[in-house]
Amino acid sequence: MRRLIGAVLAGALGLSVLAVASPAWANPPGCSQGNIALSQSGGYMTAWNNASCSSSATRTFRVEIKRHVTLLPDPVVSSYDDYYTGTLYIASTSSCDGGRSANYYGRSFFTSHPTYMDTGNLLVNTC
């Protein structure tokens, strides 16, 4: 429901939103992620996603904004960890990247597992 509200608000506010996620990979047993999204308005970027698990445990669910850099590791511009004991995880992070014009993407994952979901690249003239 929150994603639907976020998508409606983004559309109503005229924000650029990119929510094309790569296929879901291995999450902790009994856990699944929503579709990660990355939006920008006036060069200010926000990435968000949620995840749910069938059993309660202490887990860390992370969302990142990364800058795509050819032939180098992509630097993390901003990140947020939802460290929680429970079954529902929600993470969001926002950033400007110092006036750069570059391609950015959002990434989400459980820190206990090496797999992740990415959005596609979004060209942003950051603030």
Image (cartoon, rainbow, N blue to C red):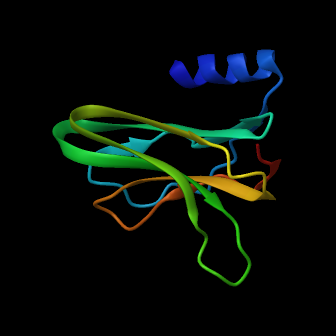
Q: How many marks?
A: 0
Residue furthest to the front in view is 98
Outermost residue toward the bottom? Answer: 71
Is residue 114 depicted above or below 42 in this figure? below
Residue ID at (66%, 42%)? 38
* Residue at the image position 19 percent from the left and 37 percent from the top: 55
Residue at x-position 52% and y-position 20% = 2
Considering only vertical position in the picture, is 70 above or below 64? below
* Residue 4 image offset from top left, x and y in percent: 61, 20
From the viewer's side, name the closer residue of 93 and 53: 93
- 46 or 107: nearer the eye? 46
Position of residue 53 in the picture relative to residue 66 (left or right): left
Residue 87 locus on image (x, y percent):
25, 33
Query: Where residue 107 sits in the image (x, y, percent)?
Result: 54, 54
Res. 44 image quadrant: top right
Residue 62 to residue 116: above or below: above
Of the pair 74 and 57, the residue shown nearer to us = 74
The quarter of the picture where the C terminus appears is top right
Answer above or below: position of 123 versus 15.
below
Residue 82's x, y, as percent? 33, 40
At horizontal 67% and vertical 45% (from top left) the residue drawn is 96
